[in-house]
Image (spheres, rainbow, N blue to C red):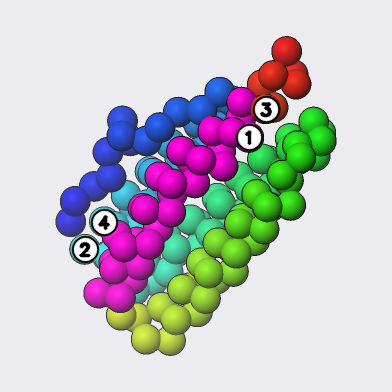
Amino acid sequence: MTQIDAEAIPTVAIDFMNEDHQEAVELLNLLLEALAEGTEGEVTSSLQNFYVHNREHFAREEEQMLRVNFPPYGCHKGEHDRVLAEIKQVIERWETDTDRAALLQYINGTVLDWFMNHINTMDTVTAMFISQQSA
């Protein structure tokens, strides 16, 4: 299974966001490894770790957006909420059917595209705004 190249992930103007994005790549790569060679329990654990990471990362971003009164906070938070709900549904589906092909399709066909697009759009603008307000 192909690993995600951490070097291909765009960077933004805030260090903690970049660090969190790199950690997300590491967790996704562990999930891909578990899908390829691991037990169902290892896949479940990797999925849950990815969910927790995103919940914590989104909370850090949201805290900073509120701190600087980021005007499109609601839009950005709404996208975070949508993605967390989606990941929860994927975990529940996995726990019911343990369909490795479906989970792999979700990662390759949904998560990676969303991740890159979210960083290139919402996170880039958010980080720029926060860094300007913090200067």
Judged by its main secondary structure, the magenta piece is: helix
- CB-based contact (under 8 Å), mark 1 and mark 3: yes
Label 3 – label 4 distance at C-alpha = 36 Å
Label 2 – label 4 distance at C-alpha = 5 Å
* In this rendering, position of residue 133 left or right of residue 120: right
Q: Which residue is mark 4?
A: 33
- Can the viewer see residue 39 in this picture? no
**Mark 3: few, some, or many residues within 10 Å (few <14, many ≥20)?**
some
Q: Position of residue 38 (x, y in %)?
A: 27, 65
Q: Which residue is mark 3?
A: 129
Front disc: 1 or 4: 1
Q: Secondary structure at mark 2?
A: helix
**Mark 1: few, some, or many residues within 10 Å (few <14, many ≥20)?**
many
Q: Secondary structure at mark 4?
A: helix
Front disc: 3 or 2: 3
- Specify the amino acid type for callout 4: Glu
Identify the residue at horizontal 42%, vertical 69% (top origin).
44
Q: Which residue is mark 1?
A: 126
Residue 36, which numbered label? 2
- Specify the amino acid type for callout 3: Phe
* In this rendering, position of residue 19 left or right of residue 63: left
* In this rendering, position of residue 34 left or right of residue 48: left
Q: Position of residue 3 (x, y in %)?
A: 24, 47
